[in-house]
Image (spheres, grey):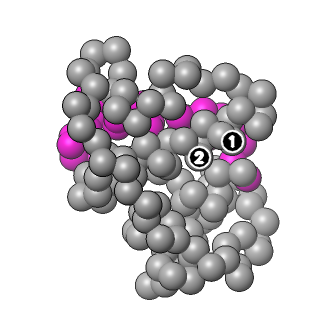
Amino acid sequence: MRLWHECLLPYLPDRQLLGQHRECCALRGRGWGRRHRTVDYVFIHSPYCLFLYHRRVMNEMECRGFQPGAEWRNPKYRGRFMKPYEVLEPICPEGLIFPEHNSSYLRECIHNLKSKGIVIPDDIGKNRKDISKNED
C-alpha cells in the first residue's frame, strides 16, 4: 500500500480512498515505525503530519457520504490497541504535508493508478503552488 499524492485524493475511486483511510489508521496505530518501502518516508516526519494527511482523506470521505470514526479526528489517537500520544505538537507544513509528494511522486502515482485501470485527468497538479514548492 502507498499514500497517494494528496492532490489525487478527490479523484480516487471510493475503493482507493477507503484503502487510504485503512492505511492511515494502520500507520497511526501499530504500524507506526514499521518499515515498508513505499511508506518509509512517513516515519521521518512528525506523526502529526500523518494525522494532517489522514484528516484530508477523512474530509474527502465525508464529502462522498462516508462516515469515518470520529475518534480519528483526534491527532493523538492511535487506534484501539495503542495508547494515545501524551504530547503531539501541532505543526503547519508549508505546501504539501509530505515534501516527498513532489511532482515526480505525483507522476509515479498517476502511472500506478493507470496500471490499475484508473484514469486521472491530465491536468492534475499543474499550476498548483503546493506542488511547485516541492519540485524535484
Seen at 37% across and 27% down, the residue is 77
Q: Is residue 61 above or below residue 47?
A: above
Q: Secondary structure at mark 2?
A: helix
Please rate how many residues cluster around mark 2, counting C-alpha atoms within 10 Å: few if below 14, some from 14 to 19, many from 20.
some
Q: Position of residue 86 (x, y in %)?
A: 22, 31
Is residue 29 rendered magenta in the image?
Answer: yes
Q: Nearer the viewer, residue 113 or 106?
A: 106
Q: Secondary structure at mark 1?
A: helix
Tell me whether the residue at label 1 lies in contact with that at label 2, contact meaning CB atoms closer than 8 angstroms: yes
Q: Nearer the viewer, residue 122 or 10?
A: 10
Q: Position of residue 89 (x, y in %)?
A: 30, 48
Q: Mark 2 highlights which residue? A: 56
| Type of the residue with mark 2 | Arg
Residue 49 in sight in this render: yes
Q: Mark 1 highlights which residue? A: 60
Q: Is residue 21 above or below residue 71?
A: below
Q: Nearer the viewer, residue 67 or 1?
A: 67
Distance CA(mark 1)–CA(mark 2): 6 Å
